[in-house]
Image (cartoon, rainbow, N blue to C red):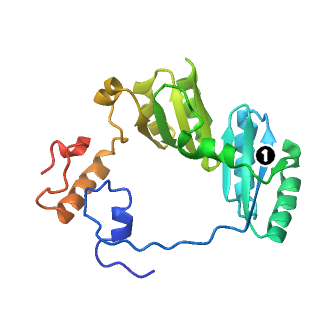
Amino acid sequence: MKNVTGYDLPKLLCGSWGRLAALTEVTLKVLPRAPERVTLCWRGLADEPAFALMRAALRAPCDVAAAAHLPGEATMLRLDGVGPSIAARRDYLGAALAAYGPPEALDDAAPLWARVQGGAGLTTEAPLWRLSLPPRAALGAIAPLLAAGGAWLADWAGGLIWLAPEGHEALIREAADAAGGHATLMRAPAEIRARIPALHPQAPGVEALSRRVRRGFDPMGIFETNRFLDEADAD
């Protein structure tokens, strides 16, 4: 870490969708996989208690590696590390979360976690949305969107919602804005993608700043693709 006197390149390039520069060489820092992994699973918790459980688990000094909720099915916490450390953290969580009942300990929960990744467990043909929301506001934000039916699941202790509603496309971004988050359209028929942009529209001030940064990196507009709303009237 050091003070930055110019552009903070890693932060700007991450998530820039190739609009700032071309990467010719990348150095990655990797960590070894944890030698052991255990998933604590509560079956059949209602949504509100499940979200409360996940928030409480992340506040505990237990280094929870992942927390997810499959509605009506399972609420999961994953612990990574060495055996004695996992055992101690598992005991602590069991006591701290006793009000939710005893969890089932799964040594191999890979199929459950695979359903969470990328919303893979939502096999419906409905459009797929990725909502980043404050966990406390997530349930209230998606409840009206599911009034007509649909499916969802939660990752990041409720901060990431994978949502496949049946309708209400025009209201999803309004709900995300009201909750203090944003929504990305990940999968949809061509008719919906033609009228709804994939990325959440930026606030006017952020959009203007983004345009100035792009002009600083790319004054000739070489990396402009015309795939984004804010490129149509770019200087």
Q: Residue at x 29, y 67 (%)?
A: 23
Asked if residue 134 shows in the view, the reply is no
Residue 227 position in % (x across, y down): 24, 42
Residue 25 position in % (x across, y down): 33, 72
Q: Camera-side residue: 115 or 128?
A: 115
Residue 18 position in % (x across, y down): 28, 56
Q: Which image quarter is the N terminus in?
A: bottom left
- For label 1, the crowd category at 10 Å Cα-Cα, with few meaning under 14, some 14 to 19 and many 20 or more, is many
Asked if residue 225 shows in the view, the reply is yes
Residue 102 position in % (x across, y down): 88, 46
Q: Camera-side residue: 3 or 153?
A: 153
Q: Camera-side residue: 128 or 206?
A: 128
Mark 1 highlights which residue?
41
**Image check: 68 left or right of 87?**
left
Q: Residue at x 28, y 75 (%)?
A: 6
Q: Residue at x 33, y 45 (%)?
A: 203
User: Quick one: which residue is furthest to the bottom in this view?
Assistant: 2
When the figure is inspected, residue 225 is found, relative to residue 176, above or below; the finding is below
Which element carries disc 1, helix, strand or loop? strand
